[in-house]
Amino acid sequence: MIESYEYNKEHNTMNPRVAFATAAFIISLISAALLLSVYFAIILGGIAIVMALLSRDSSGKLLPQARRAIIFGSVGLIGGYFLLVQAVISMFVDPEVRALVNQYSLAISGESFDDTIQDLENSLGIKFD
């Protein structure tokens, strides 16, 4: 069986670039799988993208694993930020979520979320609602 040079170059685990790109791909898959745990998806997606970009050769060419890592890492990163922004918006818009956040804030810090926002508005001189 004759294998091509390109196949061996892209799958040689002894090559540090290939190992780095493969690790980036695995981290990006974990990031996409943990999308609902927002912070893990954002952190791992960012790490995967950076690792994939660092695995480029001197001419700037990316290995297939690195390209897939950028795609899946972007899914984790963008999806995580989307869910985070959606949660913050629903905290200010949905009364049920607002009541739940007030309850948690009161239990944790002894002050409701509404009181914290009111104190922040008074100290900064701006209105959030």
Image (tube, rainbow, N blue to C red):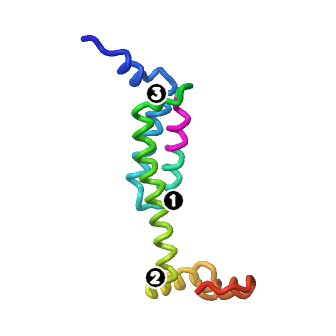
Task: In the rendered view, tell whether residue 39 sits above or below residue 103.
Answer: above
Q: Which residue is mark 2?
A: 97
Question: CB of mark 2 within 8 Å of CB of mark 1?
Answer: no
Mark 1 = which residue?
39
Q: Which residue is mark 3?
A: 18
Q: Which quarter of the rendered picture does the C terminus lie within?
A: bottom right
Residue 18 part of the magenta segment = no
- Amino acid type shown at disc 2: Val
Disc number for residue 119: none
Q: Quadrant of residue 122?
A: bottom right
Task: Identify the residue at horizontal 74%, vertical 82% (top origin).
Answer: 124
The residue sitting at the top extreme is 2
Q: Secondary structure at mark 3?
A: helix
Residue at 46% over, 36% down: 23
Along the line of sight, the residue nearer the viewer: 40 or 122: 122
Kind of element beneath mark 2: helix
Q: Quadrant of the N terminus?
A: top left
Position in image of residue 88 (x %, y %): 51, 74
Find numbered disc 1 in the image and state the secondary structure of the residue it sits on.
helix
Which of the 4 image quarters holds residue 79? bottom left
Between 119 and 110, the residue placed more toward the observer is 119
Q: Give the image location of residue 65, x and y in percent.
A: 41, 34
Residue 58's x, y, as percent? 56, 25
Q: Is residue 41 above or below residue 12?
A: below
Q: Earlier in the sequence, mark 2 or mark 1?
A: 1
What's the residue at 63%, 80% (across, down)?
109
Query: Which amino acid type corresponds to the residue marked 3 in the rendered image?
Result: Val
**Above or below, comparing residue 24 to residue 95 in the picture:** above
